[in-house]
Amino acid sequence: MSLYQGIFKRDMQVAFKQKAELVQPLMFLLMVVTLFPLGVSPSPDTLQRIGPGVIWIAAILSSLMAMERLFRDDFQDGALEQYMLSGMPLPAVSAVKVAAHWLVSFVPLLLLSPLLAMFLNLTVDMYIALVLTLILGTPLLSLIGAIAVGLTVGLQKGGVLLALLLIPVFIPLLIFATSAVDSAALQLPYHAQLAIIAAMLLLAAALSPFAIAYSLKVSQN
Amino acid sequence: MWKWLHPYAKTERAYQLCLTLQPWFWVGALACLSVGTVWGLAFAPQDYQQGDSFRIIYIHVPSAILSMGTYVAMAIAALVGMVWQWRTAYMSMIAMAPIGAVMTFIALFTGAAWGKPMWGAWWVWDARLTSELILLFLYMGVIALYGAFEDKQQAGKAAGVMALVGVVNIPIIHYSVEWWNTLHQGATISKFDNPSIAPEMLWPLLINLLGFAFFIGAVTTVRLRNEIVLREMHRPWVQALAMNKALNQQPGDAATASLKEGS
Amino acid sequence: MQFESFADFLNMGGYAFYVWLSFGVTLLAMGIIAIQSFSKHRDLLKQVVVEKERKARIKKARQQQQDNT
């Protein structure tokens, strides 16, 4: 148990040493959300209509920026190779790293979400639905994203490639999440959408550590 | 004409200047802010239309004016750094950035808290609010850019360029209420002969403006000293300064006894 | 004094929440930046001392090595 705690602690410490790297995706998120009222229309009704989609799209895009950090530092200083050779089960190591990454990258997003909801004029009901979709959906982003990050970890120009790989995969999540918030706007129940997102999350939590381990083996030979 | 400024290109002189100015700034800030806030909160008359909520003006207007003023000061520091190649200019620039960002945040937050009871909305995307938000982004960008470079001299140049490019936002913020149809009201104190605000309400506002300015100066002197110490860590005068401070703090400590022995 | 009683002052004509929220958050923000600046100052000066001691130790170790050889 303590080995995994060690990995978790190390990841958290490294993350907090580079505060700029944590803050920049959040700033990106804030600025992208700001662009929509300026570029589309500042009318409150329009913003409320497009709000859920804008916040989720901005969250996905900024998460792609933050995702690269997951294995990059370990790859550069050789720790990744050490983990792979150490005899520790790689799926478990990956799961711990993804958990640390989620805490550091997505919890700030959750904390910033009230501000974003205010900027886009979401009602309280819509905001509650949004937070629930974010709580269920962002771990899914981390888990599935880690598979693609594992594949591209050593590559030079991994950034845009990561986006190309992941955006199609995130589309179902985007559709269900925005559908949930839109239902909340119409005062309709949205348990079905949340249940499907939760099911995707459980499936990912069970299977993706193995997929991440396999993708690391593929990219690291 | 500016010859008197030239000694402050040296970090040691700049540090001494900060030490000299600092107590005045803190005292001035405390005095002006206490007087202005108490006057504004308790003694200034109620507004005819807005009731007592208008008292937020005593924070909102000074912080908004100074958020723009600090940015201009930052841009001037960047310009001095670029033209005369003074490191202390770049250091001043980055010392001012966080407090400028805090002032911008205060302006935006108090504006939202005032707007909710008055306009019914915490936030609207009108020209002045949006351009003030962009100012906050510009501050964050300057701070982020400076932090991204290992070599702080290079960092200063890069962040300086960014600060100068962003200066164009300042007149936009100021004139936004004239150039666009905005929800935000027009200028209160820019007309010098006939201000549209009653004098009993104006005085606490001006006093708070001065108080916030002193506060910004005070925090900037601390942060500039920090930046100087960080960059000049290996210089003897900095080491002497740090040793003095350590020795003054703990006179009877074993650690400081060994310090005296080792130096 | 524009208010009849202290309770009236706290109530701010019904706008208590907004007025005190504004003043409170402002005070908090100013406090945080001031405290953080001072705390950084102390930490930096301590760091200078630590670095100086470290350099002195390294120098001493090198001297001893040279004396031994």
Image: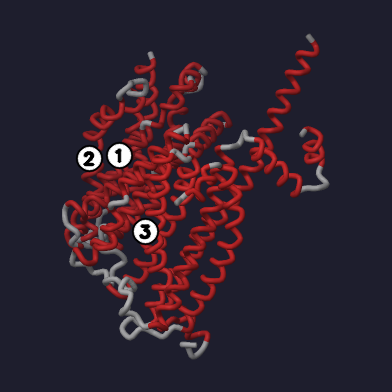
Q: Secondary structure at mark 2?
A: helix
Evaluate if marks 1 and 2 touch, with contact meaning CB atoms under 8 Å apart.
Answer: yes
Type of the residue with mark 1: Met
B183 on left or right of C13: left
Q: Which mark is residue B68?
A: 3
Mark closer to the observer (3, 1): 3
Q: Is residue B1 above or below residue A121?
A: above
* Residue nearer the viewer, A66 or B143: B143
Could you tell me residue B135's position as x and y percent? 33, 54
Locate the N terminus of chain A and report the quarter of the image it occupies.
top right
Q: Secondary structure at mark 3?
A: helix
Type of the residue with mark 2: Pro
Mark 1 = which residue? A200
Mark 2 = which residue? A172
* Residue nearer the viewer, B197 or A42: B197
Q: Which mark is residue A67?
A: none
